[in-house]
Image: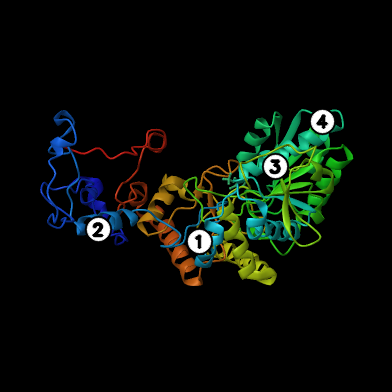
Amino acid sequence: MSEQTKTETAAPKPTSFHDTAEELIFERSRAGRVGYRFPALDVAETKLESLLPGTLLRDDIEGETEVSEVDVIRHFTRLSKLNMSIDSGLYPLGSCTMKHNPRINEAMARREGFAYSHPLQPEHQVQGSLELIWLLEQTMKEIFGLPRVTLQPVAGAHGELTGILMVRKALAKQGNPRKVILIPDSAHGTNPASAAFAGYTTKELKSNSHGTLDLDLLEREVTEDVAALMLTVPNTLGVFEGQITKIADILHRKGAFLYCDGANLNSFVGIARPGDMGVDVIHSNLHKTFSTPHGGGGPGAGPVGVAESLVPFLPAPTIERRDDGTFYQDFNRPDSIGRMRAWNGNFGVLVRALTYMRSMGGEGMRRMAEIAVLNANYIRARLKDAYHLPYDDPSLHEVVFDDKTQLANDVHTLDIAKRLMDFGFHPPTIYFPLIVPGALMIEPTESEPKEELDAFCDAMLAIAREAKESPELVKSAPHTTPVRRLDEARAARQPILKWTPSR
Ligand SMILES: *Cc1c(COP(=O)(O)O)cnc(C)c1O
């Protein structure tokens, strides 16, 4: 036993039933083992050679898996337990809003009328699906406080691109698309990528000591070359841009647009409306705030709301209601930026999100935001003596700590995150936002009961104690997971996705 594995005796009990990687052997096949036997033939046997040339026939499939039913069930059940998920516990991945996905959403998305409708069906056969999109647009309009919303974009970043392309087209129509998009250093990382994709150069604005936008700096930087500012609200420190109406004024005076990255609407939905703050264009993520499942690059939706000045440029088709109450797709939009997606976006995600909104109701969504903020602040209050808070401004739906205190014992954010897994928790977002070195970005969401928040805080406090008293224990974590510290770059770039038989 190595020195390192000896320290494992002090680790908490594993939460999965695997103690060692050896138990994870993927190869379960045993020669001659079967899961199913065909009944005896009750018809005359046909010789295969009479149907196919002998050279095409073989007696055995080389490397074929030979397993029993119980082998198969246990194999897949075991694999399903190797991952952490929101269904097994708190998943405090800041900025990602990993909240519970209510099962009624799934029941609605599976209803035959929705699940089996086809986008090429004639409009009179899919009135219900068109009405659903229209209703969701009405709801998002109310939430954004803006006159129109497109539901075509299938991710937050896709919404950003859609929004900036509309800004570009609006400015081009006035004679000059301009060149620059301003982006604060506290913005989400997708913002500069989307702006560049839409043909702009980006300029970073340094945040002030509160982690918010410096208005004097903005005033200096907004020239006739600036098309828009992309402002993440609340920003990635979980701090609200309290000066947002002044920010909008500064931009509008120079003919520039205010783009709001509202991916994380969880913090103020039903409490404040971006449209009332002077925002011209905003996207939000249905797969965060509105509880549709996400992660692993699965389907999402990033609806974009626009002010009156951008309505003509919305992606086509839009979904419209006739005076007689029927619905249709309007392709006759001469100034549209065109399609951003085949058909009408990720329809199944739209069904889930509208189900969530309707089951919560307006009051329910407001309460959801209040509890999301309360939960983040509960964690902040319990951990702030043990972990350093780089920005002291009030937190909304997430709280950002760093590893400054623990660095005294050479314990880093990565070590803390890995050690959390030994306690059965998915780690928070780490090393983001970039303006906080060693950031630990914690977002509990409203769907966690107090006991789960307490268990998480207890684990974080235990790790802070360990960092002082036995730093090696933290630095060599995780001790209880099937795999320990991976080469993350290689795991992402050279994933082994195919099973190859060992024989
Ligand atoms: C998640 C997120 C995005 C990107 O959303 P995707 O659906 O992953 O493209 C953009 N901005 C913020 C603030 C986010 O949290």
Closer mark to the observer between disc 3 and disc 2 = 2
Q: Give the alpha-carbon distance from disc 1 to disc 4, as whole Å.
A: 43 Å
Q: For the residue carrying disc 4, how many other residues have a C-alpha within 10 Å: few (<14), some (14-19), or many (20+)?
A: few
Q: Is residue 91 left or right of residue 187?
A: left
Query: x%, y% of residue 4?
Result: 25, 46
Query: x%, y% of residue 56?
Result: 18, 31
* Mark 1 or mark 3: whose residue is earlier in sequence: 1
Q: Give the alpha-carbon distance from disc 3 to disc 2, as whole Å.
A: 52 Å
* Residue at 86% from the left image edge and 46% from the top image edge: 249
Q: Is residue 96 left or right of residue 458?
A: right
Q: Give the alpha-carbon distance from disc 3 to disc 4, as whole Å.
A: 30 Å
Quickly name the residue at label 2: 74
Q: Secondary structure at mark 3?
A: loop
Mark 3: amino acid = Ser
Q: Secondary structure at mark 2?
A: helix
Quickly name the residue at label 4: 172
* Snapshot quadrant of residue 369: bottom right
Closer mark to the observer between disc 1 and disc 3 = 1
Q: Give the alpha-carbon distance from disc 1 to disc 2, as whole Å.
A: 28 Å
Query: x%, y% of residue 236?
Result: 62, 48
How many dots with numbers?
A: 4
Mark 1: amino acid = Arg
Quickly name the residue at label 1: 110
Instruction: Look at the image and tell me in which quarter the C terminus lies.
Output: top left
* Mark 1 or mark 4: whose residue is earlier in sequence: 1
* Snapshot quadrant of residue 414: top left
